[in-house]
């Protein structure tokens, strides 16, 4: 099925992504489904804008590893073509940087609203396991939800004054189409082997048992997210309720280690404080 991973993210799986980005992906996917023969042209981001997918670059001993767009896992070629970045590709960049002798610093250049749960904790853990070289996360755009989960594995995090940082949390967007089905004169019955089998089938509503199960999944994932962040950053519990912070607020709440107006200014700081 086209957009298999994205469709799961949209309607039935716990998501580590900002609502605005989620809505933009939904509109794009619905448009593509409605117009399957429309000419696509070059790769596009989740808002449909043409993009050129950046690659890792090594300069002056620093491996610049881009994390731009929605973060996915085990993506199809079609999904990659829409500007979604695969966590497996980021992991591959980390391995390559670690195996390059002249690299002393891994700099993750992030502009992402988050993405899928699958693969995110593993990627964040992989980044945290890097100890032989300096690891730094930077954003002058978005570093939210899954993107911040990954960034929190770095030894240092920096942002520009107007960057959007945080959104610690998880949610499940669940589409209840039962009323629409009923309005169309249709009713869906599920013959099931257990109370959770067939959960989310189009045209059905969630039972209380099913809703409780989803809440348990959300709480478990959110707990792991917060626990991972807390291992290296002293962020107040009140600041880990899904909010996004910018500039001084992100610094005050412990999300970042410093604020710089430009990436070049931050790089100059890194050179002066080289470990």
Image: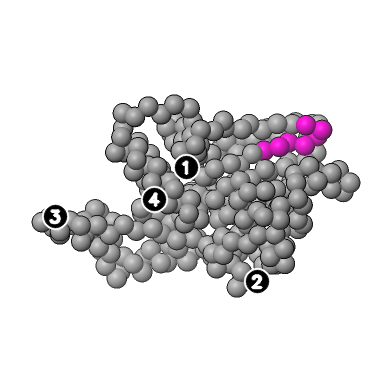
- The residue identified by callout 3 is 184
Q: Is mark 4 on a helix, strand or loop?
A: helix
Q: Is residue 249 left or right of residue 76?
A: right
Q: Is mark 2 on a helix, strand or loop?
A: loop
Front position among marks 3 and 2: 3
- The residue identified by callout 1 is 47
- The residue identified by callout 4 is 10
Q: Which of 154 and 80 is in front in this view?
A: 80
Considering the whole magenta stretch, tell me its main secondary structure: strand
Q: In this view, does 241 lie to the left or right of 30?
A: right
Q: Report crowding for label 4: few under 14, some 14 to 19, many 20 or more residues within 10 A (C-alpha).
A: many
Give the image quarter of residue 148.
bottom right
- Tell me which segment is drawn in magenta: 59-65
Q: Can you see residue 184?
A: yes
Give the image quarter of residue 30.
top left
Earlier in the chain: of badge 2 and badge 4, it is 4
Q: How far apart are marks 2 and 1 (CA)?
A: 33 Å
Q: Residue 97: where, in percent of width, then height?
A: 71, 35
- The residue identified by callout 2 is 236
Q: What element carries label 3?
A: loop
Q: Which residue is drawn at 36% across and 54% down?
A: 12
Q: Distance between the residues labelled 3 and 1?
A: 31 Å
Front position among marks 2 and 1: 1
Q: Eyeballing the image, is 123 above or below 35?
A: below
Front position among marks 4 and 1: 1
Q: Which residue is drawn at 89% across and 46% down?
A: 272
Q: Is residue 155 left or right of residue 147?
A: right
Q: What element carries label 1?
A: loop
Earlier in the chain: of badge 4 and badge 1, it is 4
Q: Residue at x 54, y 50 (%)?
A: 113
């Amino acid at each position: 099925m086209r957009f298999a991973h994205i469709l799961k993210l949209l309607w039935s799986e716990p998501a580590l992504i900002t609502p605005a980005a989620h809505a933009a992906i939904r509109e794009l996917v619905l448009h593509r489904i409605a117009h399957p023969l429309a000419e696509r042209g070059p790769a596009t981001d989740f808002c449909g804008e043409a993009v050129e997918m950046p690659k890792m670059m090594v300069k002056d001993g620093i491996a610049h590893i881009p994390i731009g767009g929605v973060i996915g896992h085990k993506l199809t070629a079609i999904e990659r073509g829409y500007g979604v970045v695969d966590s497996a590709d980021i992991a591959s960049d980390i391995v390559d940087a670690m195996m390059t002798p002249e690299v002393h610093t891994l700099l993750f250049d992030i502009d992402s609203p988050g993405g899928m749960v699958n693969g995110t904790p593993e990627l964040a853990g992989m980044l945290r396991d890097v100890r032989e070289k300096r690891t730094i996360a930077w954003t002058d755009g978005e570093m939210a939800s899954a993107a911040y989960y990954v960034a929190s594995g770095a030894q240092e995090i920096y942002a520009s004054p107007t960057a959007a940082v945080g959104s610690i949390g998880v949610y499940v967007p669940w589409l209840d189409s039962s009323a629409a089905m009923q309005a169309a004169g249709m009713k869906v019955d599920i013959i099931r082997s257990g109370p959770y089998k067939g959960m989310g089938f189009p045209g059905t509503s969630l039972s209380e048992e099913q809703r409780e199960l989803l809440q348990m999944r959300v709480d478990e994932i959110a707990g792991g997210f917060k626990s991972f962040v807390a291992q290296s950053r002293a962020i107040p519990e009140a600041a880990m309720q899904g909010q996004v912070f910018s500039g001084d607020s992100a610094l005050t709440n412990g999300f970042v280690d410093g604020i710089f107006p430009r990436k070049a200014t931050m790089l100059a700081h890194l050179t002066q404080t080289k470990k």
